[in-house]
Amino acid sequence: MQHYVVLSRKYRPKGLSDLIGQEVLAKSLRSCLETKKVPHAFLFHGIRGVGKTTTARILARCLCCIGSDGKTDITSSPCGVCRSCVAMDKDQHLDIMEFDAASRTGVDDIREVIEATQYAPVLGRYKIFIIDEVHMLSKSAFNALLKTLEEPPAHVKFIFATTEAQKVPETVLSRCMAFRLHPVSPDALAEHLINVAQKEGYTLEKDAANLISEESEGSVRDALSILEQALMLSAETKIVTLDSVLKMLGGATSDDVKVLLKLILDAKTKEALQKSEELFAKGTDPYVLFKNMQNVLYRIIVDKVNGKITNYSLSNLLYIWQIFLKQTENLRNASFPEYVLSAAVVILSHTASFPDIEQLMIRENPSEVPNNFSKIEQILGDKITPKPDTSNELVSNILSKFPGSTAHNVE
C-alpha cells in the first residue's frame, strides 16, 4: 500500500527560490551563502506555517551540499544528487539533527546537543542543529547553551525556529542572526494554491482560492490543509468552487455577507437580525460569518478614506470597527456563539444609527462647519461645559468675598 503524503509535505520547498512570499529572506540568505559569510547561528521567527522549519532545512541543505563531484563549496543552489542532498531527501542525514524544544525542554536534553557538537560531520561539511520552537526551552537549558552558542566549533551551525521570538532570552538573540518570516500575501498564496490544485489534477476557482488564502491568514500550511480537504470533497467533479469551500468552512456566500453588513450599516436592526437567523438555519458558522463581515467592512473603510464611496460616516465606520474587534474575542470564547453574534448585530446596527459629529455641528450652526478636529473640540467644549455667567448678582457677591480678586480674574 502506497504511503499517502499530505500536500503541505508533498509540496514542501527544497530551494530558496521555491519559498512562497519570502523574497527578502531568500535574497539575504543567498547573499550570505554566495559571499561565504555564514554566521554560526540563525533564528527564524514568524507565525505558524510560513516556512520557518522549511527554511532551516533548505539552509542546512545549502551548507552541506558537496556537489556531484564531491568537491563543491557551500552553495545557494543545492545539486540534489550528491550523497548529502540524497540523505536530506530521505530524512536520513547523519549531520543534520532536528530537535523539538516543545517536547525536550530540559537542561539534560541541551547537554546532549552540546556533547554532540564535539564530533566531526560524517556526510556534509557541517554538523547542523535545527531546534524548533526554541522559546520552549527552560531557563536552565538556555543558560547551558549560551557558551557553546557563542563560540561553537568551526564545523557546527545552529538554526533556531520559533513562533514567539519575544520569549527567547536576549542573551540568545544577541548571538544569532535573526530573520522574520512574514505572513504570505493573499494574492501570492492564492496563486500557489491554484498551481498545487492543478498539479493534483483539479481546477481551483479564483474566488475559492482567494477565500482559502483569507481564511489561512497568511499561513501556507493552513492554506494547503484547507485545500486538501476541499479537493477531497470535489473528487467527483475535479472542480473546487467558491460555494463548496464556503459550505466546507461553514461560511455564507459573499453576497449574503454583503447584504447582512449593508443592513447593519443602514441601521435596519430588525431586518439584519432576521438575515443572521436565516444564515444560522443554513448551518453558517457564526465566527466565520463575523470574520467575513469584518473583512468586507475593512474594504468599505478603505474605500471611504480614498473617497470611492460617499455614503456612511467615517467616524461611525471606525467606531463599528472597534466593536467588531471586541465582539470577535467574545465570539471566540462564547458557549453559544449564535447568541453573541445576534446581540452583536443589534449593537452594530444601533450604533450605525448614531449621527455623525460633523452633522451635529451643521444642525447646531449651519453657517459654520468646522474643518478640523481642534475646532470641533472647541465647539463641543463650549456646548458641554459652558463658561459661568459672572454677570449674575449672586455670583458677583460671592466673588467679592475674596480680597484681591475680581470676577474676571476668577473666571
Image (spheres, helix red, strand yellow):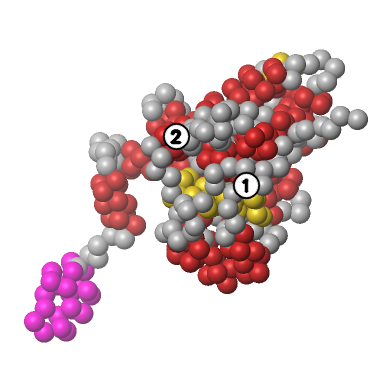
In the rendered view, does 248 fall on the left or right side of 309?
Answer: right
- For the residue marked with disc 2, what is the amino acid? Arg
* Crowd rating for badge 1 (residues with CA inside 10 Å; few <14, some 14–19, many 20+): few
In the rendered view, does 338 fall on the left or right side of 110?
Answer: right
- For the residue marked with disc 1, what is the amino acid? Val
Image point (75%, 30%), residue name = 228
Residue at image mark 2: 30
Mark 1 vs mark 2, CA separation in Å: 25 Å
What is the total number of numbered labels drawn onto the structure image? 2
* Crowd rating for badge 2 (residues with CA inside 10 Å; few <14, some 14–19, many 20+): some
Q: Which residues are magenta?
A: 391-411
Taking 119 as reference, is 370 above or below it? above
Figure quadrant of the C terminus: bottom left
Secondary structure found at label 2 = helix
When asked about the image quadrant of residue 386, the answer is: bottom left
Closer to us: 253 or 115: 115
On the question of residue 61 being in view, the answer is yes
Residue at image mark 1: 122
